[in-house]
Image (cartoon, rainbow, N blue to C red):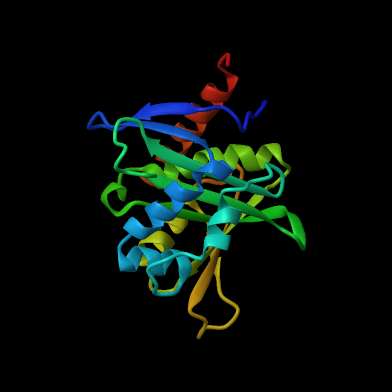
Amino acid sequence: MPFHPERELRTVLADGTPLLLRSLRPEDRDDVAAAFRRLSPDALYFRFWARFREVNPRLVEQICSPDQKDHVGWAILHETRDDIPCVAGASLWRLKDDPQAAEVSFTVADEFQGRGLGTLLLAVLWEHALSLGIRRMVGYVLRENLVMRAWWSSLGATEITEVETQRHRVATLILDESLLEKSSAADHLRARLAWVRSGMEAPA
């Protein structure tokens, strides 16, 4: 199935919130930086494993400069609220020593957490990754981030750690729908995968 990184996809949450899903662009730098500043201290810590208020501008520049080959980035934007710079975003980075695998990371604004946006981003990253020959997603998750670890597990990701005292776990998800768990989280992902595919197949 063809995948179009330039395609914009629209959806509506259960409460009527209209959202736009699209690839990140260099001109998104200021909005992404502002979105990181709006995160709670705990949300920032779980995303970057450190406590600070201002994300390094060079990192923001990298996040917003996907090459659509080894680095992919997607954002979810609120279509009617200019005061919310970015509702959620996710990035994928191909591993240099394993080109069929990629590290992924997710960020969701505090007030939008628990509403399925992580699954929506995972679905579009999944399809984008497959189009690039990537077959496995790898997530590095802090040991105390129980919510994220439980989410990965509910999808069927394996979790390992080389040393028990490490502060993080490594979750690996194979991009094969037949291997997904029988769970509500996996069912939600399957539905979102079908939605992304339908959006990619629709006329531009």
Instruction: Report whether 187 appears left or right of 42.
Output: right
Q: Position of residue 123 (x, y in %)?
A: 51, 39
Residue pushed farthest bottom? 165
Q: Residue at x 64, y 54 (%)?
A: 93
Please identify the quarter of the rendering in which residue 61 is found: bottom right
* Residue in the picture at 29% in, 54% down: 110
Name the residue at the left extreme: 15
> How many numbered marks have been drawn onto this rendered protein structure?
0
| Vertical order, 156 against 42 (above or below) | above
- Along the line of sight, the residue nearer the viewer: 102 or 187: 102
**Is the N terminus in the top left, top right, bottom left or bottom right quadrant?**
top right
Q: Considering depth in this image, is 79 or 182 the residue closer to the camera?
A: 79
* One can see residue 178 in this view: no
Could one spot residue 140 in this view of the protein?
A: yes
Image location (x, y in percent) of residue 96: 75, 60
Image quarter of residue 19:
top left
Tell me residue 107's x, y (percent): 43, 54
Using the rendered view, name the quadrant where residue 78 is placed: top left
Work out whether 10 lies above or below 140: above
Q: In the image, 20: left or right of 66?
A: left
Above or below, 53 relative to 73: below
**The C terminus is located in which quarter?**
top right
